[in-house]
Image (cartoon, rainbow, N blue to C red):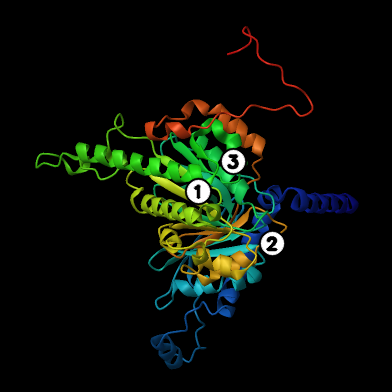
Amino acid sequence: MTALWGTLLVVLLVVAFLLRWLRPTWYWLTFGVTFAAVRVLIRYRSVMDACGLTLPPSRWRLTLARVANRPVPESRPPRILWLRPTATGLVLRLKLRPGQDAFDFSASTDRLRHSFALHNVVSREIRSSVVELRMTGYDVLRRVRMPAVGVSGEGLRVPVALREDGEVHYRDYRNVPHALHVGATQSGKSVYQRTLAAGLASQNVALVGIDCKNGVELAPLAARFTALADNPDAAVDLLAALVAYMGRVYELIRTQQRISVSLPDAEITADIWDLPAHLRPVPVVLLVDEVAELALAASKAEEARRDQIVTHLVRLSQLGRAAGIYLEICGQRFGSELGKGITMLRAQLTGRTAHRVNDETSANMAFGDISPDAVLAAVQIDKDRPGTAVAGDSSGGWSRIRAPHTTLRRAVDTCNAHAHRTPSIPELEPFRPAVPVRVLIGKVQPKPTAASAF
């Protein structure tokens, strides 16, 4: 009987070891969550005391203990409201004691991670005097598996990556209209952009692209693009047409406001989202693959063209949100060396994402005015983990994310499947891309006959 129990124990340990190595999610749900919850509850008081997150006894408690000749009372840790397991870790919600600060918990996340023997701890303030610690039991960014999430066709909210706390990272254009992406070569910017385009393909949106690498990144997705420019000369005309379209949308909004005493407040609008559904213009997302190619100039003529491009981009970033025009600008660097107006454009880009960068200056271009910690995190991204990035916004919050590896074939198939959703905008019709023909390497593709053409 003893031998049987020993064999079962050995088999159980082998299974747990294999699951932890091959299927960390399964290991966490079967073994890890129980061990981690017990460990957190047992160590909770001592860890909080060691990290300086307890409240010393008050004077009246010390006086009462002295009068009653009792031992000096211990410091009190925050009260546990609840401990909830998740598919990737634990969520611990705490009620702070009077005099405690939520910032102390944010500053102690690394010590809490080591003390509880978990992979990562993220602290955030839920409301006044309530702090939530989201703890992950394993490295969720090592092999990104996006959970199944429902995406509506109207929300302009696209799941693009997985955060280090196991939550899905969304690109929400209604809340963060414009965004900047920086990163070195082979850092994962193109894959992120590909994932974003594939996610937007199923939504009611017009995709407009500027890809000055002769369209090698965005041209394969042309079936879903309303307009596409593959060189700076075409880009300046495309941006001018987009500015003209923005003016027409504002004229529509003005004619539909009809502000009067009898008009309900809910029907007064200053953007496209409060217009009636049958009058609402389709929102536009502008994807710029490499902004430096638009800003570089080697002659007087190129300088004049560059000034026009930057002026149009600044105008779209300042005025485009109400007209339903959103910017997604990518580049390896985005500093003042690109010329006049670039820093003004960067100030309008609320969302910031930095992939692996080669120097701290490049990270400062994205997060220098937001969070020094985000700059340090961007510099420390491992080159062996392409797609890993630091995402934040102008509010100062940031987190590590990693986009799933979306192949070009998968993105092309997605865009082709939703090609019927591509809207037509009169101002952008001259820039409508031709759908690329599939080329068979090493073979001559036969010409379609009258019977087979369609």
**Gap in angstroms between the C-alphas marked 2 and 1:** 23 Å
Residue at 51%, 41% (x, y): give it.
209
Q: Secondary structure at mark 2?
A: loop
Residue 337 pos. (x, y %): 52, 66
**Gap in angstroms between the C-alphas marked 1 and 3:** 26 Å
Q: Is residue 156 visible?
A: no
Disc assigned to residue 215: 3
Q: Is residue 237 visible?
A: yes
**Gap in angstroms between the C-alphas marked 2 and 3:** 29 Å
| Image quadrant assignment for residue 214 | top right
Along the line of sight, the residue nearer the viewer: 344 or 262: 344
Residue 102 pos. (x, y %): 45, 71
Q: Nearer the viewer, mark 2 or mark 1?
A: 2
**Residue that badge 1 annotates:** 170
Within-10-Å neighbours for mark 2: few <14, some 14–19, many 20+: some
Q: On screen, 9 above or below 158?
A: below
Q: Amino acid at mark 3?
A: Gly
Tell me whether the residue at label 2 lies in contact with that at label 3, contact meaning CB atoms closer than 8 angstroms: no
